Image (cartoon, rainbow, N blue to C red):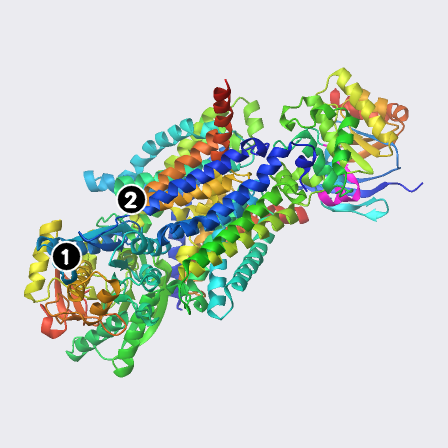
Amino acid sequence: MAPILSIDRVTKYFAGLTALKEVSFDLQPGGIYGLIGPNGAGKTTLLSILAGSIQPTSGTVVFQDRNVTGAKSFAMAQAGIVRTHQVPRPFRALSVLENVEVGVRFGRSQGSAGDLWDARRILEWVGIAHLADAPSVTLSVGDQKRLELARALATRPSLLLCDEVCSGLTEPETASVLRLLRKIQDAGTTILYVEHNLKAIMSVSHHVIVMNFGEKLAEGSPEAVQSDPSVIAAYIGRTA
Amino acid sequence: MANYICNPTKWYSLSVGLLFLALLAVLPGCGKGSKGGTNEIAIGVVLPVTGREAKPGQYQREGIELAIHQINQGGGIFVRELGKKLPVKEVFYDDGSDQAKSAGLVERAMSADNVVAVLGGYSTALGEAESVMPDRYQTPWITTGAAASTIFSHGYQYIFGTLSPTDLLGYTTAEFLGSVVDHGKLKKGLKLALALENTDHGVDYGKGIDKWIQEHPGYFNVVFSEKFDLGSTDFSGLLQKVKNARADIFLADAHLQDYITMHRQYMQTAMYHQMISYGARGPEADARKALGDATNYIFAGIWWSGKLPYPQVKRFAADYQGSTGRPPDSWYAATAYEGMRALAAAIEHAGSLNKTAIRDQLRTVELTDSLLPGQVLRFGKNGQINTPFVIVQNKPGDKVDIVYPPDAATGEAIAPKPR
Amino acid sequence: MNGAGKSGASARPRFAFAVAPLLLLAVLAALPAFSLGPNTVRLLFVTLVWVTISIAWNILGGFGGQVSFGFAVFYGLGAYTAALSVNSGVNSILSLLLAASVAVLASMLVGLPTFRLRGPYFAIATIGVSEAVRVVMTNVSMTGGASGYRIIETRPFHQLEHFYAALALAVVAVAVSMQVRHSKFGLALIAIREDEEAASDLGVNPYRTKLLAHALAAALTGSAGGVFAQYAAFIHPQGVFAFGIGVAILLMPIIGGIGTVWGPVIGAVVYGLIQEELIASFPQLHLLIYGSLLILIVLFEPAGIVGIARQIVPRLRARMEG
Amino acid sequence: MSAVDLLNLLIAALLQAGVYAAMSVGMTIIYGVMKIVNLAHAGFLMLGAYFVYELYARFHIDPLLGVLLAFPVFFLIGMSVHWVLVRRIPTSDQPTLTSLLLLFGLWLVLQNLGYVVWGNSDRAILTPRTLDVLQIGPISFPTVRLVVFGAALTSLGSLEFVLHKTWFGRAVRALMQNSDAGRIVGVNVERTARVAFGVGIAFAGAAGGLLAMIYSFSPDFGGPFLLRSFVVIVMGGLESFAGVAVGSVILAVVETFCILVLPANYQPAIAFSLLVLALIVLPEGVAGLWNKRRRWA
């Protein structure tokens, strides 16, 4: 099977500092990929490059056989890559439903007719349909995370980039969000999932990529990665 | 600034209602305005008494009000049609030196206040904007402070002006300098540097100078001529160029504020010119206050001077001092005073308050005891008067002398300017 | 287009939406028949011009959150374009279209570089653009530079023609504003205002959306400038390009309530009243009024007069019912 | 154009740069610490001018001494403005439109205050040295500009001293670099912000006094200088004091020398165009160019 996303020697400098150094990997369609690493490993930088929020200094990004290197985030979203933010960023003046509508109307679907029903269905799907007409600012943290996911899903992505969807959530909330991720995967969307919470990520991913100091350290199944000595060294080296 | 979108339906009708209320509030405000009736003659006065042109605008207002005061002391203007004298009532608006506003206020006076005529329009830009209105409302308008002849070149039928055209100012300025050369005080063939305000006023001034120079070859040649924007805070760039041009005579054409700012910076560049003029500005008290002795020997071509040797000028100066507590500062009050007097004469001749009849009389009215140089005020075919200019020069000890024309002179021109 | 309406809002507001503006329009259109006198018509005319511009600014600044101090550029260019084309024999409606086109062109020239800047930097850049354009226009000889430019009137002046032109334009502006508010385009603008990056992450092209809003606003502002120029018949760069005009254009919608359809309209009416009634008697007081209003609005009620009304009305209603 | 003319121009430019630096530094402090673009800066420049004028006109206090007195007076004014208005708006690491509009409103109010108190005719300070010129060979130095230049350098120098030698200076520098980090190391952000706002306004007031020694002024005074201050601090990279010096010199030199190729009345457009250009091309100031080059290398 052809990879849905393939990145090749992606490098990013910030004002002379190297944030990412020649990172390469492929994602196959339909999986949940975990992206882990200690603080400052370059996970969010990589996610931002894939989402088009920032542009790589060098390297290529190929998505569904299209070279999308350096595309802006709206172009990425229209191509089918969409991200969520670690801290939810709802459009505060808009209702929950209207927030989702933005995704419906401007994402890959560029929907017009019947899209409202779509937006409502998505809200139902993530479990906040009862809040559709509430102002988005009134939502709890957990519901804001769901809204963040709903908005992203509304663009009908092929690849969903999740940035720490579980941070700041309680145990039961985390469990329910993880269930949601699996549901999304079941519906055919590939997920690249950045997470600090190792337990969460190991439980949900079928493939894990480990980064350290801006470089890819290892990748493989959760079990294989967990027993990789270089990974252990990186984590222990940091915590010690 | 969040959360300004909410369900519009709740308050929608309310906001529309507010709009209606606001509109209703407007209407009575505009409907009113004195329905002058037959007890008095309403005359609109639109001048800048705030903003950049506040000082001259204020002087002009004082001139007009002095004339109105004197007319009313005599019982008013006799209107034959009504068989009685009616007092003059001033309807005053301040345009804040803003041209769009001044046009709007002239329109307001002409359409809502039942005036028989409007006086005003100080400075060329404001005068240009106002000059659109008189023909629309068939109401005579006399500008007492805008001299650019373009205003009078559009074929308007209801506009008049009590300032001679600016090209004559430029011409007289050059003529005066020529006479100084003839007296042997300055050499022939001197180099002139011109700095002109970037308006029709400046253009006309420059044209006048050019005209004289072309008619009298050999006297002067212009080595530098550039425009500047009124209201700048900084003229150092322009002055640097003037300095580099190494001219013998510096002639600028500026408004009062610009004259003060520019001359201050002129002094700081350590330039020397044998003669300096700022066009129609020079002897003002404000300049003296801001610049002190640095204003000495500056000469100016002006429409009127308190030094003119006519008895009516002495009387006017005394009356003005009596009503305001200070002597007339330069020419501003006099041309405004004369504008009001000419209007009063025209109303009396017309014998009615019909605006077209008054306009017809303004075309032929003649004041033979005028304050202005030559003592005769008569509007030309285009509506503008054409009295001669006088050249005055500042002298040490706060003295100002008329130095040209010779028949009005109160002192000798000092040239070249002592270093 | 109206997402919220389709979702099953009651029929009454939709009725209000359709009827109230028509009613307002009818009243305004019939006003001159009451022989109000030219001064009232002039005041209405000026207010309608302000209404149009205020609405235009609100499209970019209110919905899109891009605060521009530089709308005098479009107003002035519109005025000059209309004046130049009327003088060269173009009929007055066509000259307004030309004015709009030139303003749109200018909005592109201004927007292409400046929309790369965010928020306050954009605002500051527009100050620079506006002042630079004023200086240049003061020196362009084709338009008479600082001498100003005059429309040579070839036929008698009919005030009502100008009034109806301004009225028509204001109606167009209100219609455009309502349409934008409830359209996909409006949704994009609001999303950009709230969080430009998040909007872009969801597929909204912020740059293009802002340029489009800028162009739309410029077209309305430019035509309004053209309508004004045809009435004034004399325009001057220090007048139509003045920084004060740019400031006034920004103050009106903010005072009325930005991001709403009717806030800018109310703001413009209030502004027109203050200009007319206060300036005649207290020329400098308006600065104090606008300044304090701005401070109060920023600190306490970002939604302006509309926001205040929104707070008061429910209380009044509660009192009346209770 | 002779060498002497060029030298005269260059000196004029440098003296002008001193004026620009003096008027921009207050804006930089406030921006650096609070990320607020102080649009009311022009209003305080104007008040500073009138302050020095009144002291001179009423009590014959030398304008230079007046400038010195302006520091404490405007410091207190600045602190009160912060206490009454500025602290009520949310703080942010990015400049916000809220603060921009708030201070713009304040500018309008200050202008009105100026009109009410002083009317609208131009004022000017005339001292014996106002029109004096120091002539050294063919080169002339306007005395008052030399004085202003000296005063500007002195005040910048003392500010530099304060920033590096005092508690307040360290707190300010910490906040300018990173407000979160500043908070973590125990800087009282609100107090520092209040003092910084006071210092910024103090410099604005004093700069207004210096400007009043050169220019005539009215309540509208300050607008053109406000924009020039923007240009200076944007070119200087928005929050560095060395940047202010660099920005001032660039602006003054460009403005002064452009008259050789442009008609003088286009001169004001230079600053405005530079402003737009600097914002777009040099978002990190002139120093950004240096950084970029290093990155490419």
Q: Tell me if mark 1 has few (under 14), some (14-19) or many (20+) residues whose alpha carbon lies within 10 angstroms of its own.
A: many
Can you give x and y, in whole percent of width and height, for residue C90 in the image?
51, 68
Numbered mark located on residue B67 in the image: 1
Can you give x and y, in whole percent of width and height, for residue B370 in the image?
12, 67
**Callouts 1 and 2 on one subunit:** no
Can you give x and y, in whole percent of width and height, for residue B409 in the image?
10, 70
- Tell me the residue at 58%/34% (across/down): B8
Mark 1 residue type: Ala
Name the secondary structure under disc 2: helix
- Tell me the residue at 72%/19% (across/down): A169
Q: Quadrant of residue C269?
A: top left
* Horizontal side of residue C118 vs D205, given as left or right: right
Residues rendered magenta in the picture: A73-84
- Is A21 part of what is drawn in magenta? no
Count how many numbered circles sit on residues in the image.
2
CB contact under 8 Å: marks 1 and 2: no
Q: Chain of mark 1?
A: B
- Pick the quarter of the image with the C terminus of chain A: top right
Q: Which sits in the foreground, D295 or B7?
A: B7
Q: Tell me if mark 2 has few (under 14), some (14-19) or many (20+) residues whose alpha carbon lies within 10 angstroms of its own.
A: few
Name the secondary structure under disc 1: helix
Can you give x and y, in whole percent of width and height, for residue D43 in the image?
37, 41
* Horizontal side of residue B43 vs D108, given as left or right: left
Q: Chain of mark 2?
A: C
- Is A81 part of what is drawn in magenta? yes
Numbered mark located on residue C32 in the image: none
Q: Which residue is mark 2?
A: C281
Question: Quick check: B340 above or below D190?
Answer: below
| Residue D286 appearing in the image | no
| Residue C204 appearing in the image | yes
